[in-house]
Image: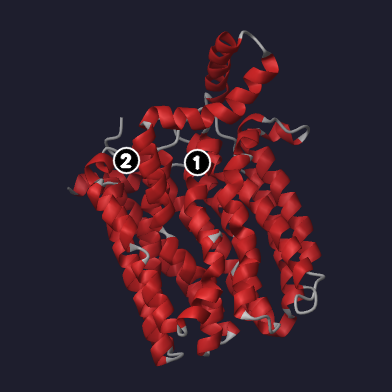
Amino acid sequence: MLHAWKETFARYRDVRLLWIFLMGCCSGFPFLLTGSVLSGWLTDAGVARAEVGLLGSVATVYAINFLWAPLVDRVHLPLLGRLGQRRSWILLTQLMMLIFTLLLATVNPASHLLMAGLFAFGIAASSATQDIAVDAYRIDQFAPHEKASLPPAAAIAIIGWWTGYSWPGYLAFAQADQLGWNNIYLLMAGVILLLMLFTLLVREPVTAREQLQAQAERQYQRELHGKHWITWFAVTVFEPFAEFFRKNGIKVALMLMLFIFLFKIGEAFLGRMSVVFYKEVGFTNEQIGEYTKLFGWFITVSFTLLGSAFNTRFGVVKGLLLGGSAMAASNLMFAVIAAAGPLEWLLLMTLVVDNFTTAFSTVAFVSFLTLLTGRAFSATQYALLASLGNLSRTTLAGLSGYTVDWLGSWERFFIVTALMVLPSLIMLWMLRERFNGLSASDIK
């Protein structure tokens, strides 16, 4: 038993995990710009919470990024392409995020809410495209036989994501009252420059992706009688999705997609309204930054490492069941805060439980999606699966502000979000035998 645990933790000495960590930072940071920092700015500017929730729907673009993911898999960028297929797309999207962030820093959302929304949408669209390339970068680092390395890779990616999200977020909320939100966005533009440096420092993964795509092209050429442009289009747009359904079968593929959509819907509703809730209950910007960003980072990192070890040893299905069950419990603790008021010790306890659920469920979820992804079209297939999880988080969660108003209290809202987790857990339990075949330790 001890030897097995030592072998599990020994996987963290792989230098590729450092590169994955840096790319995780790049992926997590933009969520601040269109998420909690933007919500804090809008709330301080006097924008109604229903509009805050609705403006957060710019993140819907994350739910449809699979539509242009084939381009990230197949189109080689001029000039930047010398960095490699994955890094070139990451750097391009970071440049676009930098431009839109600087533009957003010039806007007063109280009087120009539509303009702020347009610039926030530009950041979200660039970030959603970056995520396609970053996820593919992580998947491409490991050969198909290195399946036991997937939970550690998922854990390090999540730790990187939370580092990119939490530390700049703490800085933003801690300095917001002194600097003003417009200057905070100028500060965030400086963070993007640092992330661009990360992209230049990491190493492009070496894969057989182009050979596999060429093999698919030859197959389509035989079937389409050598029509080049039709062949390219079919391999780029059609084949990634066709391969996924062929590999799993239509029925199983649809069940997997439904589970992915449902799993984090409750967490999505809670996350969209969390900053608005903290402010309405009575927490200050500094407290929000200190507890949810700084302290939350330490707890998330600790539980993520533990969660990855658990998923490596016992499989992703048990990780999903444990994380999903805890997810419902953490939402109920927010209902207690709503009833008790701004008690720091209660917020601290709630964040411990909430970050535990995030760590266990997200490591299992990312590992689960990675195991379903092929290597010829990793960007497209992972984007398709991740977009289903994002769909509930971005599109439906845009109604979260209206849901609070309709239910009439924060307590009822958090109880409802806890109940949202149950359908996916029931589905997972019913299909556990089939899903057990997707364990990171024994998948074939």
Q: Position of residue 323 (x, y in %)?
A: 32, 60
Residue 442 as seen in the image, left or right of residue 149: left
Type of amino acid under label 1:
Tyr
Whether residues under marks 2 and 1 lie with C-beta atoms below 8 angstroms apart, the answer is no
Q: Would you place residue 221 above or below residue 105 in this image?
A: above
- In this orientation, which residue lies closer to the viewer: 202 or 74? 74
Q: Which mark is residue 440?
A: 2
Q: Position of residue 166 (x, y in %)?
A: 55, 67
Image quarter of residue 252: top left
Upstream in the sequence, badge 2 or badge 1? 1
The mark lying in front, picked from 2 and 1, is 1
User: How far apart in space, not on screen, are marks 2 and 1 (Cα)?
Assistant: 16 Å
Q: Which of the 4 image quarters holds residue 298? A: bottom left
Q: Nearer the viewer, residue 10 or 152?
A: 152
Q: Which residue is mark 1?
A: 382
Instruction: Work out which quarter of the rendered image holds the C terminus and state it.
Output: top left
Q: Position of residue 106 (x, y in %)?
A: 82, 70
Could you tell me which residue is drawn at 34 percent across and 68 percent down?
Answer: 419
Drawn side of residue 55 relative to residue 219, left or right: right
> In the structure shown, which secondary structural element does the residue marked by tag 2 occupy?
loop
For residue 276, above or below residue 122? below
**Crowd tier of the residue under label 1, counting other residues whose Cα lies within 10 Å: few below 14, some 14–19, many 20 or above:** many
The residue carrying pointer 2 sits among few (fewer than 14), some (14 to 19) or many (20 or more) residues within 10 Å by Cα, namely many
